[in-house]
Amino acid sequence: MMNAMMIWRRNKQTAGMEAILEGARFHFAKYKRVPTAISVPSGFLSDSEIASLRVRFKVTVDAPQYFKNEVWFGMEDVA
């Protein structure tokens, strides 16, 4: 479960990884915390990009496919 959740919509010209970085920066500015969980729709990132993000974040590929340009950022519950 995520809290302090935010949905970030990329424009169609922004590459997937660039959109992730923009959204993470915005999340930090808004909540003063780096997001710990990211949910992307299938096809948003390549397998290698997902693997590189998993070094630092919990990444799931389960965001709704009908929102193909949206990334969900949040803080993972620890409880």
Image: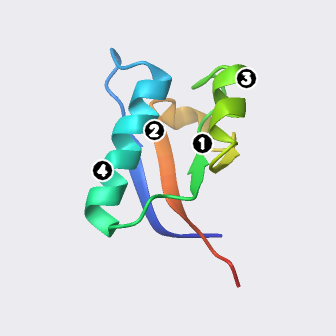
First-in-chain label (3 vs 1): 3
Q: Amino acid at mark 4?
A: Phe
Determine which residue is flagged by label 2: 70
Determine which residue is flagged by label 3: 47
Q: Is residue 70 above or below residue 6?
A: above
Q: Nearer the viewer, mark 3 or mark 1?
A: 3
Q: Secondary structure at mark 1?
A: loop
Q: What's the distance in space between the residues labelled 3 and 2, CA to CA?
A: 18 Å
First-in-chain label (1 vs 4): 4
Sort mark 1 into few (<14), some (14-19) or many (20+) by Cα contacts within 10 Å.
some
Looking at the image, which residue is at 36% across and 20% down? 14
Q: Is residue 59 left or right of residue 16?
A: right
Q: What's the distance in space between the residues labelled 1 and 4, CA to CA?
A: 21 Å
Sort mark 3 into few (<14), some (14-19) or many (20+) by Cα contacts within 10 Å.
few
Q: Amino acid at mark 1?
A: Pro
Q: Amino acid at mark 3?
A: Asp
Residue 76 x/y as whole percent: 61, 68
Q: Is residue 20 above or below residue 75?
A: above
Q: What's the distance in space between the residues labelled 1 and 2, CA to CA?
A: 9 Å
